[in-house]
Amino acid sequence: MNNLRGILLITAAMAAFSIEDSFIKFLTASLPQGQVLGMLGLGGALVFFLLALRSRTNVFARSAFRPALVWRTLSEGVAAAFFVMSLSLVPLSTVAAVFQATPLAITLGAALFMGEDVGWRRWSAIIIGFIGVMIIIRPGLEGFQPASLMVLIAVFAIAARDLLTRLVPVETSSTVVSFWGFFILLLSSPILIAFTGAPQPVDGVQMGLITLSVMFGVTGYYMVVVAMRLGEASAIMPFRYTRLIFSLVLGLAIFGESPDALTYLGAAIIIASGLYTFLRERQLHRKGALTPP
């Protein structure tokens, strides 16, 4: 029953993130990307600051400025900036499809920078998965959108963020980590504004969409945390890929997107590679647990 609840929560979280992405894409059609980034950062940081006050957690404690958390926060800022830029310039379905390569990028980073032992099977899955990314992006071919490379930069920045999270001291509160993850968006927004245009007046509809974006983003984050605590990772993790399905539906319904066959093929290759990598890691962990000392 806990696994079922976890699956339902993780699926709902992926739907929430997809809806948030749709709101962001809609907003960046009428507001500069840097302004949208800053407003999202302000809203999210305010939510977690209030949560910190409620739990009497000091978000400005010395632990918040340790190197691992500082680098994690900077990675979050880079990832968010490029993700928002890509949403404004690239079809939602393309962004979502390429974004599914994040688990592969994490495994790649763990092997290259954290000394994790990755065998030839997972190396093969990583290579095949990124071939799927190239099929979607199609560099050098007709239909290639240079802006789609921004999604790839966001993927690697998010992978760096997740790997750096492993180095954050256990005693550091998740609320503190989350607060700085949003606050960096507010700090980095002036840099993006310098390239995307000066802030513009915000009307009631736009403010409502910003508020909804923050609500869906924070709710999705919370549901992921609860889901991972309720159920087994092996049962829950594959359902993270439902985000692509929700994004495809929203892209068609709201923005009239119609991905071509190569996009579907590339997405299928990425998901298959990611699932294989995850299942292989699970198998190796089980073998290690069963091996007597």
Image (tube, grey):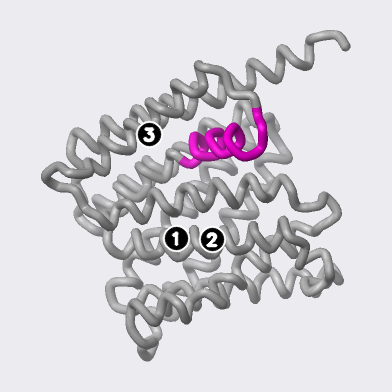
Asked whether, in this view, residue 212 is left or right of residue 219, the answer is left
Q: Quadrant of residue 131?
A: top left
Q: Secondary structure at mark 2?
A: helix
Q: Is residue 132 above or below residue 199?
A: above
Tell me which amino acid carries mark 2.
Answer: Gly
Q: Are marks 2 and 1 in contact (CB under 8 Å)?
A: yes
Residue 31, position in %: x, y?
Answer: 33, 79
| Residue of label 1 | 20
Whether residue 186 appears in this view of the structure is yes
| Residue of label 3 | 130
**Residue at 42% in and 73% down:** 209
The disc, 2 or 3, on the residue closer to the chain's N-terminal end is 3
Identify the magenta region: 102-116
Determine which of the numbered discs, if any, sits on residue 217 in the image. 2
Q: CA distance from mark 1 to mark 3?
A: 26 Å
The disc, 2 or 1, on the residue closer to the chain's N-terminal end is 1
Q: Which is the main secondary structure of the residues drawn in magenta? A: helix
